[in-house]
Amino acid sequence: MKPKKILELITKFLKENDFDVVFGTGTFSGGHCIINENRVVVVNKRMPTEEQIRVLSSVILELELDHSRLRKEAREFIERFR
């Protein structure tokens, strides 16, 4: 599976888990925070796709979200960052 598709799957997973996923530009790599009681993940869209996936994966792993429903390829990608 191509990295772009994995990025789409992981982004969709986070949105289904009540996260706002924002792709922006700037001098940051990304991460998660809570703004006005909304859970937000910010990703620098100028980073390579694999780095964007790493940022999203780190949020999933740090918050111990159950990602067992994701497709095997996406789960394997996330587990590489454990």
Image (tube, helix red, strand yellow):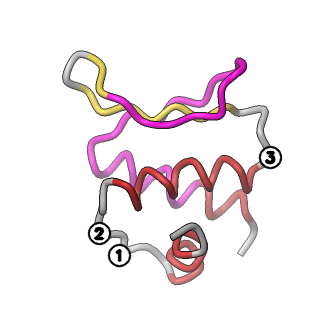
Q: Dot 1: within a 10 Å radius of its alpha carbon, few (fewer than 14), some, or many (20 or more) residues?
A: few
> Badges 2 and 1: C-beta atoms under 8 Å apart?
yes
Q: Quadrant of residue 25?
A: top right
Calculate the distance from the C-alpha at mark 3 to the C-alpha at mark 2: 25 Å
- The part of the chain drawn in magenta is 8-33
Q: Is residue 18 depicted above or below 29 in this figure?
A: below
The residue to which callout 1 is attached is 69
Amino acid at the residue labelled 2: Asp
Mark 3 and mark 2 lie on one chain; the one further toward the N terminus is: 3
**Dot 3 or dot 1, earlier in sequence:** 3
Q: Camera-side residue: 2 or 39?
A: 39
Query: What residue type is disc 3 on?
Result: Pro
The residue wearing badge 2 is: 66
Amino acid marked by disc 1: Arg
Return the x and y of residue 56 as percentages of the image width and height. 52, 50
Left or right? Give the position of 42 relative to 3. left
Q: Nearer the viewer, residue 12 or 49?
A: 49
Q: Residue at x 65, y 34 (%)?
A: 29
Spatial CA distance of label 3 from label 1 is: 25 Å
Q: Vertically, is 46 above or below 74?
A: above
- Rendered-image quadrant of the N terminus: bottom right
Q: Is residue 37 left or right of residue 22?
A: left
Q: Residue at x 30, y 19 (%)?
A: 35
Question: Which residue was labeled with disc 3?
Answer: 48
